[in-house]
Image: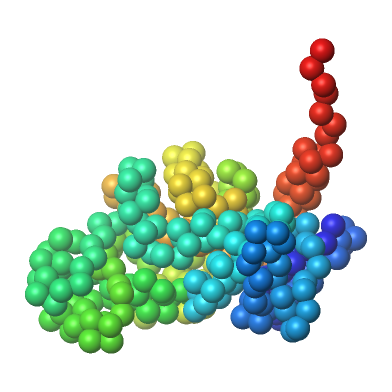
Amino acid sequence: MRIALLTMEPDNYSNRRFIEAAESRDHVIEQVRTARCYMNINTLASTVHYDGTVLPYFDAVIPRIGSSITAYGTAVVRQFEMTGAYCLNSATAINNSRDKLLGHQLMAMSSLPMPVTAFASSPDDTDDLIAMVGGPPLVVKLLCSSQGKGVVLAENKKSAQSVIDAFRNAEANFLVQQFIADAAGQDIRCIVLDGKVIATMRRQAPSDDFRANLHKGGSAHEVKITSEERKLVVKAARVMGLKFAGVDLLRSSKGPLLLEVNSSPGLEGIEKTTRIDIAGHVMDFIETQTFQSRARIRRPTVAAA
């Protein structure tokens, strides 16, 4: 099997693990830098070009596109889909999860519990926006935020107004969200693959921060989730259309609340914490999908009697 690993960071832990998992199964896997791809779009043979040549056919694509080039990256994924390659996550599903506003709207339409979330454009709506989420403390989150970057806790009304005004002046799109104090600086990261939870960890924020992201100094611990939590994260991934996802949830006095759904979750923290071979599970799933696709294509048509 020939696999393309679509990425902007060839040397990070997650990519190395996917390469190890593929090569241990005797597959050919090539790292393809997303931004260096360009496309020939036509009705006869749509192709992906790279460094002056047409890329060969890939049986499967693992999209690990950076959040800073989501629009271009998903266009490249869509082009690979047009060539007939199996993409671990589709371009549509990646867009659903990367657009945090759309993602929250999709979850709300599916009646999935989450912190109260508000969005507005006019500066005249700031006070109503703050009131809508129950007042301070509250969280202001850039729509393009990742790894805890662009996420700010406003502890009082004055600081909330200042942060919102600053984001507006920068012409940045953002959400205002209810702060869940009883989560106590913890969240749970769940890895979902093909409608099943295959790994979970609890992340704890450092004492001087509210963000539990490991990139921000948080710590990771093994955790077991309840059947209610399991059903919730599986449904969240399905609503986004993701086959492979990292789903974050909070435990609150009102029950579990969904925080975010990630289309290309990092593997380092959760593999080292749980000692689960997530990259291997992903590769096994890709094998199954591509082999089933080949079988459907090659299956002979039986003439009617």
Residue under the point 84% across and 39% down: 298
Image coordinates for residue 3, horizontal then vertical, percent: 78, 63
The answer to whether residue 250 shows anywhere in this view is: no
- Tell me the residue at 11%/70% (across/down): 125
Residue positioned 82% across, 21% down in the render = 303
Residue 195 shown left or right of residue 301 in the figure? left
| Position of residue 108 measured from the top left corner of the image (x, y, whole percent) | 32, 49
In the rendered image of this protein, does residue 48 appear above or below residue 255?
below
Q: Position of residue 272 (x, y in %)?
A: 67, 66
Task: Describe residue 196's horizontal placement relative to residue 298 as left or right.
Answer: left
Q: Nearer the viewer, residue 171 or 76?
A: 76
Query: What's the residue at 51%, 72% (across, down)?
Result: 70
Residue 264 left/right relative to 97: right
**Quarter in which the N terminus is drawn:** bottom right
Q: Nearer the viewer, residue 123 or 277?
A: 123
- Which corner quadrant of the image does residue 148 belong to? bottom left
In percent of width and height, residue 155 lies at 21, 76
Image vertical order of residue 257 relative to residue 147, above or below: above
Q: How is the image coloured?
A: rainbow
Q: Residue furthest top?
A: 305
Quadrant housing the C terminus: top right
Residue 168 or 111: which is nearer the viewer? 168
**As rendered, which of 237 and 6 lies closer to the eye?**
6
- Point out the residue furthest to the right here: 26
| Total marks in image | 0
Residue 73 at least partly seen:
yes
